[in-house]
Amino acid sequence: MIEEEFYKLKIFDKVGINQLKRKFPNQLTSILLWYKSDRYNKIQNYKSFLTNKLKQMTKDGEHICLNNEQLYGLFQWW
């Protein structure tokens, strides 16, 4: 697993940290470093920002909702 895949799985796909540790036991050190990094926090904060903004937006009176894949695609574009 590479760092970008970790962020996608943990933040956008909402895979638990313990599940990631079990799935990738040979990368425990990297997983913990990525999980505690400033970059992780920035991506998490940006996802929360996007999610909140989307909740505020409406189209034809309906809230705009993106699934995790679409939200990740928007994040990659940004």
Image: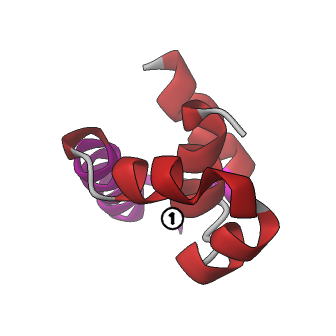
Q: Determine the residue located farthest toward the right in the rendered image.
A: 23
Which one is in front, 25 or 61? Answer: 25
Q: Tell me which segment is drawn in magenta.
A: 40-68
Q: Where is residue 62 in the image (x, y as percent from the top left)?
A: 55, 65
Which one is in front, 69 or 24? Answer: 24
Which residue appears at 67% of the width and 62% of the height? 13
Q: In this view, does 6 lie to the left or right of 50?
A: right
Q: In this view, does 4 lie above or below 56?
A: above
Residue 38: image quadrant is top left
Residue 54 sits inside the magenta stretch: yes
Q: Is residue 58 left or right of residue 40?
A: right
Q: In this view, does 16 lie to the left or right of 40?
A: right
Q: Mark 1 points at which residue?
A: 63
Q: Determine the residue located farthest toward the top in the rendered image.
A: 77
Which residue appears at 41% of the width and 59% of the height? 32
Mark 1 element type: strand
Q: Is residue 17 above or below residue 38?
A: below
Which one is in front, 74 or 26? Answer: 26
Which residue appears at 74% of the width and 75% of the height? 22
Q: Is residue 1 above or below residue 10?
A: above
Observer able to see residue 67? no
| Image quadrant occupied by the N terminus | top right
Q: Position of residue 26 (x, y in %)?
A: 71, 54
Observer able to see residue 77? yes
| Image quadrant occupied by the C terminus | top left
